[in-house]
Image: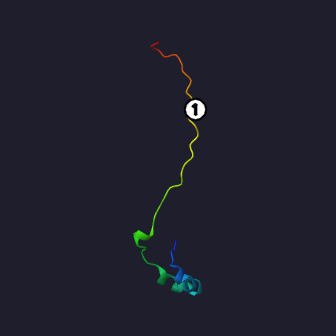
Amino acid sequence: MVVLLDESQYDAWLDAPAEGSMDFMQACPPERLAATGEPVERAPAKAVPQTASLFD
């Protein structure tokens, strides 16, 4: 499980006993989250060889 902490909570999280870890679990406000995709580098398109068709 991922836990997102404010910087002010780091020491309390690290010093907390395992049974106290659930005290830190709460929903994260959506405005604090953002997802962005990495740009994808695309290879140049390969030329498709022209072939004779049935209608030529």
Query: Which residue is denoted by mark 1 in the rendering?
Result: 46
Instruction: Give the side of residue 50 with respect to residue 29, left or right.
Output: right
Residue 19 position, x and y percent, is: 53, 85
The residue at 58%/40% (across/down) is 43
**Vertical side of 28 occupied by 42: above or below:** above
Query: At label 1, which amino acid type do we have?
Result: Lys
**In the current view of this chain or complex, which residue is farthest to the top?**
56
Figure colour scheme: rainbow
Residue 26 position, x and y percent, is: 43, 78
**In the current view of this chain or complex, which residue is farthest to the left?**
30
- Report the number of discs: 1
The residue at 56%/35% (across/down) is 45
The residue at 52%/86% (across/down) is 20
**Vertical side of 29 occupied by 53: above or below:** above
At label 1, counting other C-alpha atoms closer than 10 Å, the crowd grade (few under 14, some 14-19, many 20 or more) is few
Residue 11 position, x and y percent, is: 57, 85
The residue at 44%/70% (across/down) is 32
Q: Secondary structure at mark 1?
A: loop
Residue 2 position, x and y percent, is: 52, 71
Which of the pair 34/27 is nearer the observer? 34
Quarter of the image where one finds residue 44: top right
